[in-house]
């Protein structure tokens, strides 16, 4: 795939900011459970994976062709809505500030954030999926053992994929709404 070098810096900057901000609530929540150096490195590696993947896709010539049209508008609107959903959940995580991670219970308000549920689903999918491919994550799930790099990285990737699916769905519904508005403008009688 031949991607023009001139689009990389702008896309990399945009997706670094976007993925960093949308990952912030999940990162804060995950630190209450995955607070080892290996887990933090794995979460950062997972976010970096999505930054690079989104950069590669949006810097491609194919995306450049649709970026200016209705599909591009719906994708931009979808990314904004998805970022707002993540950032709106941040105040619910304020009770986590100053929390002694090793001894305290997590903040009950975090269950009202979308990122909590994406993370919870990602944990289940990673644990169950790991069994299917022969990876034993039972010590992490059942015994609350510190998760290693692989488990945390895979969980971060699965959560990122779930969030990406939500982004695609938001963009799809945005496309439907934008398309309906555009058709309504075409059919409105001129005075």
Image (cartoon, rainbow, N blue to C red):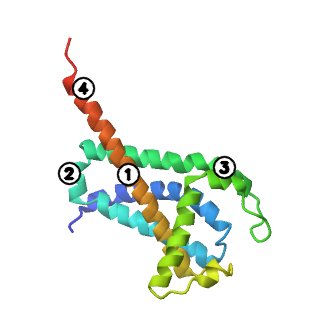
Helix or strand or loop: what does disc 2 sit on?
A: helix
What residue lies at 20% left-to-right and 51% top-to-bottom?
65
- Vertical comparison of 99 with 76: above or below: below
Name the mark nearer the viewer: 2 or 1: 1
Name the mark nearer the viewer: 4 or 2: 4
Q: Which mark is residue 92?
A: 3
What residue lies at 45% left-to-right and 62% top-to-bottom?
162
Assess disc 3: are there few (<14), some (14-19) or many (≥20) residues with their C-alpha within 10 Å of its C-alpha: some
Q: Would residue 44 be visible to someone looking at this image?
A: no
Q: Nearer the N terminus, badge 4 or badge 1?
A: 1
Residue position marked by numbered label 4 in the rendering:
185
Helix or strand or loop: what does disc 4 sit on?
A: helix
Residue position marked by numbered label 1 in the rendering:
169
Assess disc 2: are there few (<14), some (14-19) or many (≥20) residues with their C-alpha within 10 Å of its C-alpha: few
What residue lies at 62% left-to-right and 78% top-to-bottom?
141
Residue position marked by numbered label 2 in the rendering:
65
């Amino acid at each position: 795939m031949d991607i023009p070098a001139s689009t990389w810096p702008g896309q990399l900057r945009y997706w670094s900011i976007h993925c960093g901000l949308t990952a912030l609530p999940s990162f804060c929540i995950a630190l209450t459970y995955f607070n080892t150096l290996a887990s933090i490195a794995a979460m950062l590696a997972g976010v970096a994976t999505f930054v690079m993947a989104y950069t590669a896709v949006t810097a491609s010539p194919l995306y450049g062709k649709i970026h200016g049209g209705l599909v591009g508008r719906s994708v931009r609107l979808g990314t904004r809505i998805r970022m707002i959903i993540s950032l709106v959940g941040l105040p619910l995580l304020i009770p986590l500030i100053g929390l002694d991670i090793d001894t305290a219970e997590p903040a009950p308000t975090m269950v009202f954030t979308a990122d909590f549920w994406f993370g919870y689903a990602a944990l289940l999918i990673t644990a169950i999926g790991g069994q299917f491919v022969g990876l034993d994550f039972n010590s992490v799930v059942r015994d609350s053992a510190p998760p290693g790099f692989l488990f945390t990285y895979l969980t971060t990737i699965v959560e990122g994929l779930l969030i990406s699916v939500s982004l695609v769905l938001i963009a799809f519904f945005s496309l439907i709404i934008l398309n309906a508005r555009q058709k309504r403008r075409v059919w409105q009688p001129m005075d």
